[in-house]
Amino acid sequence: MKTLLSVAAVLGSLWCSQASAAGSAGTFIDLTSHGVGFAALLIFVVAYAVVMAEEFTDLRKSKPVILAAGIMWGMVAFVYTANGQLHAAEEAVRHNILEYAELFLFLLVAMTYINAMDERQVFDALRAWLVRKGFSYRQLFWITGWIAFFLSPIADNLTTALLMCAVIMAVGADNPRFVGLGAINIVVAANAGGAFSPFGDITTLMVWQKGIVDFWTFFNLVIPSVVNYVIPAAIMHFAVPKVSPRAVDETVQLKRGAYVIMGLFLATIATAVSFHNFLHLPPMVGMMTGLAYLQFFGYYLKKSHYPAVDMKDADQDHGELGDFVPFDVFNKIARAEWDTLLFFYGVVLCVGALGQMGYLALASQAMYTDWGTTLGLSDPFLATPANIMVGVLSAIVDNIPVMFAVLTMNPVMSEGQWLLVTLTAGVGGSMLSIGSAAGVALMGQARGKYTFFGHLKWTPAIALGYVASIIAHMWVNADRF
């Protein structure tokens, strides 16, 4: 034990002696060229490699990044403390935690509403309606795609993709080819639709909460998003079977209060937008206020509860069903995707630690200045190569850490460039099945029918849509550059 402590002390003294050359008490310490920085980079890479292997290992993605975040900040704090800056790391990590807290509370409310609507059978009713209409495979291909495109700005791309995938699996159970193509189409559509709304994707939400782009400004990305979806969908259309599936006579009745909860969700969104735009409060405050709407309505549902078995004797509106179990809003909170929420914690703190070490400043200089200068671009378009690359990286790594890194770098860019990086981070992940939460989720939901290599076959078509959407944005929003 004494030997281990001695080795640790020697290594610590070496790291600190290196770092002390870069800073003194009260100053920033550059660790990009020192052992502690290299070790932190290695830890982050290993942790993210484990995250990307989640499909094969069944190890939840939150676990490696949470561990990595703790180790990396421990290393940062060790160096700063050894150099006499006892509270520097504490102040820096508190700033990261504040950013995470806003994101966490916002998403928690959104997930709670989605779970409440799911429990009231809103999504099951939509799925059943589509299934019993007897559409052809090609009609369903476009219908589910467009629904995914317009639903994801409200319900988020992950929830939308799961819902639409349930539809295509229900009607295409006997046709794996249709399910595979339909899943790719839904991933592209959900990601494209989520790119023009702060509620559609985590990346757009982060940009909005940061106050960089106004709520209504995001809707300037509608046309580029449509282009991003339509081009690959039009190419895939000809591969969709020309036959029609067997119609299934399925009816799902909404539970009591379903329409009210949908209205309260819209009211919550309006509250969040109003608080941010007019009162200059974080959107999270508006969302938490909206959670109170659901809590009070849940109280009413619980007090006025009647069992479903007695529904024939109950006074019902809209033909809604009663419940076997009283409505409990805290059950909906408990059903939130906690692995995803904790994953965001790990990502935010890991990227924050890299920023505290100086790596994000180096990346910002290289991406947002050097690349554009090398290509001879003028100032308004200096950041264009970097913002295009963000989308490519999003397909490989995941758009959340990439976008958080960009926001932490906070490069000086025009509004058009911020919209560009929002677009590319949102839709770039569509190029690979592992590039977005929607794609990863559907690989599990449609296991064996929607696969990494099945998606990869259509990557050129999706990449064509990616390039076309960038061109469309630079043309439609030219006045914002």
Image: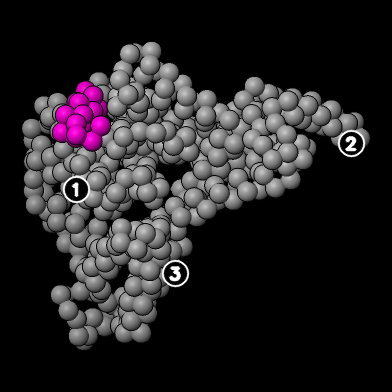
Indicate which label's residue lies in the foreground, 2 or 1: 1
Q: Where does the magenta region start and end?
A: 464-481
Mark 2 in CB contact with mark 1 (< 8 angstroms): no
- Marks 1/3: CA–CA distance: 29 Å
Three-letter amino acid code at the position of disc 1 = Phe
Query: Which amino acid type is marked by label 2?
Result: Met
Q: Nearer the viewer, residue 360 or 248?
A: 360
**Dot 2 or dot 1, earlier in sequence:** 2
Q: Is residue 14 above or below residue 81?
A: above
Q: In what element is the residue under mark 2?
A: loop
The 10 Å Cα crowd at callout 3, few under 14, some 14 to 19, many 20 or more, is few
Single out the mark in the foreground, 1 or 3.
1
User: As drawn, is 53 to the left or to the right of 468?
Assistant: right
Magenta stretch: dominant SS?
helix
Q: Is residue 139 above or below residue 287?
A: above
Point out residue 474 in the picture as x, y percentages from the top left corner.
21, 29
Residue at numbered disc 2:
1
- The correct choice, above or below, for 327 with respect to 310 in the image is above
Query: Which of the two labelled residues, at mark 1 and mark 3, occupies the earlier sequence position?
Result: 1
> Which tag, 3 or 2, sits closer to the chain's start?
2
Q: In the rendered image, which residue does mark 1 sit on?
A: 150
Q: Considering the image in quadrants, where does the C terminus appear?
A: top left
